[in-house]
Image (cartoon, rainbow, N blue to C red):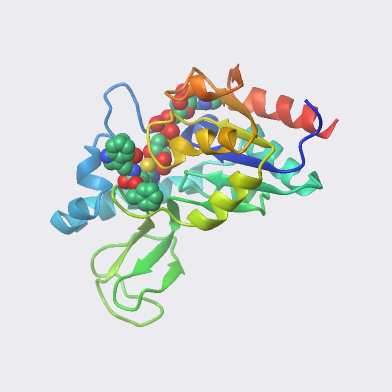
Amino acid sequence: MCKPDNIVILTGAGISAESGVATFRAADGLWEGHKVEAVATPEGFAADPALVHAFYDARRARLDEVVPNAAHEALALLDAEWPGELLIVTQNVDDLHERAGAQRLVHMHGELLKAWCLACDSRVPWTGSMSEAAICPACAAPGRLRPDIVWFGEMPYDMDRIEAALRNADLFVSIGTSGAVYPAAGYVQTAKYCGAHTVEINLEPSQGSIFFDEVRLGKAGVEVPKWVEEMLA
Ligand code: BV8
């Protein structure tokens, strides 16, 4: 195919797996030992805020122990070097893309390192634990902070920007995602409908593999640098 101009890259937990960040759909289908409904829904948070804070506090604390891997580094290089439009749309809530240097990046499901104050609606950087007694740095209200994470049933972030990029894409690449969650899982069909060439890079075929023109099986840490090298050749 001729050289694409505009690229959209969707990433999921698989791109952070080699950095030591747990993926979601382990064999037991639990999220780090929890039922999804209990820890990743507004209802779960309302029912047991302490459990949900503990779940996200543990994942936030673990970010200090992990570093970006070769796949994050390769995407950051492509982002820096690519002359056309490029957007990395990550479903991940870790900060490994940023730490690798990615700039043209959106976190459609939010970020572990942010808090959302339900009293003043501010979103603020947050690194420590976020117990029910935490004080909002913007309005000083106690106990009104929640993780700035998009839970099931909630509207993902940056949808307009993502859909505009998909409509304009010549190339859509999906890396390390199971294709289990919408609307992200439907992006390959939108991109394809709008004429993009579609590539999946994954350890194994995802639920949406049939929609991709090309499937490259292997570890992200190996396949993504190879793909970026091809793109920049
Ligand atoms: C919404 C933040 C309305 C939380 C997450 C019925 C049908 C269709 C849809 C629905 C339905 N019922 C309900 C829905 C909607 C629902 C949904 O899709 N549910 C699913 C379960 C059916 N979606 C929502 O509620 C979303 N909101 O729909 O609002 C709306 C709709 C349209 C437009 C506007 C509004 C919000 C969903 C967001 C939930 N939050 N994350 C947190 O992180 O704690 S979801 C979470 O799981 C991730 O963010 C990601 O999106 C999703 C899937 O995870 P993956 O990243 O794919 O990771 P996974 O573990 O599953 O897979 C890992 C992959 O990596 C595997 O493929 C593996 O092979 C690969 N891999 C592993 N190691 C490597 C590797 N690949 C390469 N190298 C390796 N080394």
In the displayed structure, 20 sits above or below 97; it is above
In the displayed structure, 82 sits above or below 118; it is above
When asked about the image quadrant of residue 72, the answer is top right
Spot occupied by residue 144 in the image (x, y as percentages of width and height): 26, 71
- Seen as rendered, the residue at the extreme left is 47
Q: Residue at x 33, y 82 (%)?
A: 140
Image quadrant occupied by the C terminus: top right
Q: Residue at x 19, y 51 (%)?
A: 44
Question: Horizontally, is 78 left or right of 96 in the view?
Answer: right
Residue 107 in view (yes/no):
yes
Q: How many marks?
A: 0
Q: Residue at x 36, y 82 (%)?
A: 139
Spot occupied by residue 34 in the image (x, y as percentages of width and height): 23, 38
Question: Horizontally, is 175 left or right of 24 in the view?
Answer: right
Spot occupied by residue 141 in the image (x, y as percentages of width and height): 29, 80
In terms of depth relative to the viewer, which is nearer, 203 or 183? 183
When asked about the image quadrant of residue 191, the answer is top right
Spot occupied by residue 193 in the image (x, y as percentages of width and height): 56, 35
Question: Horizontally, is 95 left or right of 6 in the view?
Answer: left
In terms of depth relative to the viewer, which is nearer, 179 or 14? 179
In terms of depth relative to the viewer, which is nearer, 129 or 173? 173
In the displayed structure, 13 sits above or below 214; it is below
Q: Residue at x 32, y 54 (%)?
A: 154
Quadrant position of ligand 1: top left
Question: Horizontally, is 226 left or right of 176 in the view?
Answer: right
Residue 58 in view (yes/no):
no
- Seen as rendered, the residue at the extreme bottom is 139
In the displayed structure, 211 sits above or below 68; it is above
Image quadrant occupied by the N terminus: top right
